Each structure stands twice: as structure tokens, then as C-alpha cells.
Amino acid sequence: MHMFVVPILATVALTFQGTDSLTLEQALMRARASRPRILAAGAVVERARGQSRLTTMIPNPTAQLQADDIAPTHVTTIVQPLAWLPRHFANAAAGRAGVSRAAADSTQIIADVGRDVRLAFFASLAADQRLTLIGEQSAIADSLVRIADRRVSAGDISALERDQVAQEASRSRLAAWQARESARTARADFGRAIAWATPDVPPPTGQLGDGLDGTPAPNDSGDLSRLPALRAAIADDRAASARLQSARLAQLPLPSIIAGREWGGDPEPRRSVILGLSMPIPIWSHGREAVAEAKGAAAESAARLAEARLTLTAQLTSARIRVVETSARATFARDSLYTEARRIRVGAVRLYEAGRTGIVPMLDALRIEREIAQALVQELLAFQQARADLIALRGDWQ
């Protein structure tokens, strides 16, 4: 990454300091500007480009100077190896494949950061939603205590029944304290995900059911070409094939060019030009060992590519299934289950206040609503988690 990009990213990050709340888009923007892993994603590609240049580097010539004080003569020669020449294009292909692999890895790193932000954002949002729901339940329980006090004074119920209502209110307050702890820890994790520099992390703002009423998941279970994990496997296979070709071409015994001059001599000084070739003699090794190793690596890479296609097909299909199923459950919990539980609780409280029902139906309705409210939040969060996993698997950011 260019050195002038870092100050720009820092400036973008500072624009969010002091804000009251953060939307998902703002959280993603903040993370992209501030998370160190984003900088690492660019460094991965830069390193691969450097490695690619190393594999195609032309070896420098070597110079030699000889002097004979007895003759006296002087000989200077320059030797330029040519063994790199037939392997140059194969090595270049391997280098390009390495850069493609790094680009795929970089895309996946960025997508994983986006997934991390989404998970932390909606986890904090869910924790806040739980705290709100339990707060409402606690307020309802407190109002029921006041109703029970009035009914005790009127002689409609016993003090024991009033104590049972008070105990339920105490349980609601305890649940509220637990929910507050979860909300604070979730907020701290959200701050880590967006690289917030201070403890006072702004709360996330948005809907926990964001995206629930749209298309749950794109129907792209057969489209694997855009997945960074598959692009990385394809690049590895191409690099291994190019290295095998390079190892085979390395078996060609190409010479090194020798050029130089000789001068001096006694009794008659002379000057002469030296031109020649230096040929390697393949006595101890013909390069078959390197070819065998590269051939095995290419076969292994091809097998990994085939296995990656199978794995990613299953992962993409499973991710889509999870999004569709969690969407259906969350929609049912939101539009049917929780609505019905809330209606029953309102009716039970009204009947209890009017003295037309006992404490057991009213407390049961209150507890069931609390359990269903928690289940609703959990199903909505499961939908957002499944959605974040699918987006990251596809290598998308937003």
C-alpha cells in the first residue's frame, strides 16, 4: 500500500470520532479505514509481486581477473549464464499465478473483516434489543406488583399471591442486569471490530431484521468462479503447472557466454580477445529429481483444486440454505409467535387487573412472552449471522 494512503485512512477514521451512533454502512467504512488487517491485505499482494519479480530475475554476470607476475600476463573475463532463458516464461507464469493467489487471499481477508464487523454489529444490536425487551418486561412486572398491592388492600387476593408477583418482578430485574452486562460486552467487541480507539463506543443503529423481507439469498449455488477460495485454488494449480514446466526446461544444458581480454607477456607483449562458452556437464544429476518433485506438487495441487470445488459447492449451498431457513424462522417468530404472545400477555394482565383470572395464567403469559422475545432476538441474530457468512464466502464487502 502506498505510503500516502495511511494518512488518508487515518483521516477517514477520525471523522467517526464523537458520533452518537453508527449505521452498518458507517461501521463497515470505519473498519475498512482503520482495521490493521485491511492494511495486511494490501501487503499480501505487494509481497507476491516482489516474489514474482524474484522468480524472473536475470542472473548477473560474473567478472574474473587473473594476473601472472612471472609471465607477466593479465586476463579479465566476464561470464553470463544462459540457463535462466528457457525457464523465464514458465517462471513468469508461476509468478503471475502467485499474484492472482495473493489477490484472492486479499479479497477474502477484506471480506472476512466485513463479516467480523457484521457479526459484531448485529450482536451488539441484538444485545441492546434484549435489554430493551427485558426492560419492558421489568416495567410490566413492576406495574403488576402495584396492581397486586391494590388487590391485597381490597381483599381480592392473599399476601402470598402478591409476594409471587413481587418475586417475578425481582427475576425480571435480575434478567435486566444480566442483559445489561451482555450489551456492554457486545458493545466492546463491536468497538474492536471497527477499531474504535476509546472505550466509549457509539451504539449501532439499525434494524435487527434488516434484509429479512427481501430476497433471503441469491440463487448462485452453481457459480463458484467468483469465490476467492476457488480463485486461490485455481491460482495454486496454475503455479504448480508452471513450476513443473520450468523444472523440465531446466534440464536443457544451456551454456554460459564467456568474453574477455588477455594482455601482457614477456619478452613480447601481446593483446588478445577471449570469446567462448562454458557448458554444464550433466554427470551427477540430469534434473530428474526436481522434475519429479514438481510433478508430484502439480498432481497434489490439481487434486486440491478438485476437492476445493466439491467443498465450496457444499459450503455455498449450505450457506444459502441457512439464510433461507433462518429467514423463515425469524419471520415466523416476528410476525406470528411474538405478536401472539404479546397479545395473550396483554389480555392476561387486563383480566388479572379486573379480578377475572388468577395469578398463574398471568405469570405464565408474562414468562412465555419473555421466552419468545428472547427466541425472536436469537432467530433474527441467527439470520444476520447466516447472511454475513454467505457474504464473506462470496468474497463480497457490502
Image (tube, rainbow, N blue to C red):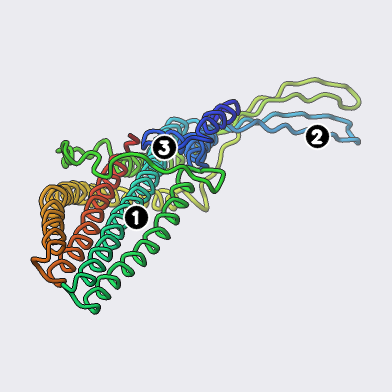
Q: What is the residue that sits farthest to the front in this orientation?
A: 154
Mark 3: few/some/many CA within 10 Å (<14, 14-19, 20+): some
- State the quadrant of the C terminus: top left
Which residue: 31% across, 69% down? 171
- Give how far apart the Cα atoms at labels 1 and 2 are: 86 Å
Question: Going by the image, does 396 lie left or right of 278?
Answer: left
Name the residue that disc number 3 marks: 22
Identify the amino acid type marked 2.
Answer: Gln
Identify the amino acid type marked 1.
Answer: Leu
Identify the amino acid type marked 3.
Answer: Leu
Name the residue that disc number 1 marks: 131
Question: Do tag 1 and tag 2 residues touch (Cβ < 8 Å)?
Answer: no
Which residue: 23% across, 66% down? 150
Residue 112, position as x, y percentages in the image? 38, 45
> Which is more N-terminal, label 2 or label 1?
2
Indicate the quadrant where residue 347 lies.
Answer: bottom left
Relative height, residue 383 to residue 235 (above, below) = below
Residue sitting nearer the eye, 318 or 291: 318
Mark 1: few/some/many CA within 10 Å (<14, 14-19, 20+): many
Residue 54, position as x, y percentages in the image? 55, 36
> Which is more N-terminal, label 3 or label 1?
3
Circle 1 or circle 3, nearest the eye = 1
- Give how far apart the Cα atoms at labels 1 and 3 are: 19 Å
Residue sitting nearer the eye, 85 or 217: 217
Q: Secondary structure at mark 2?
A: strand
Residue 84, position as x, y percentages in the image? 52, 34
Name the residue that disc number 2 marks: 66
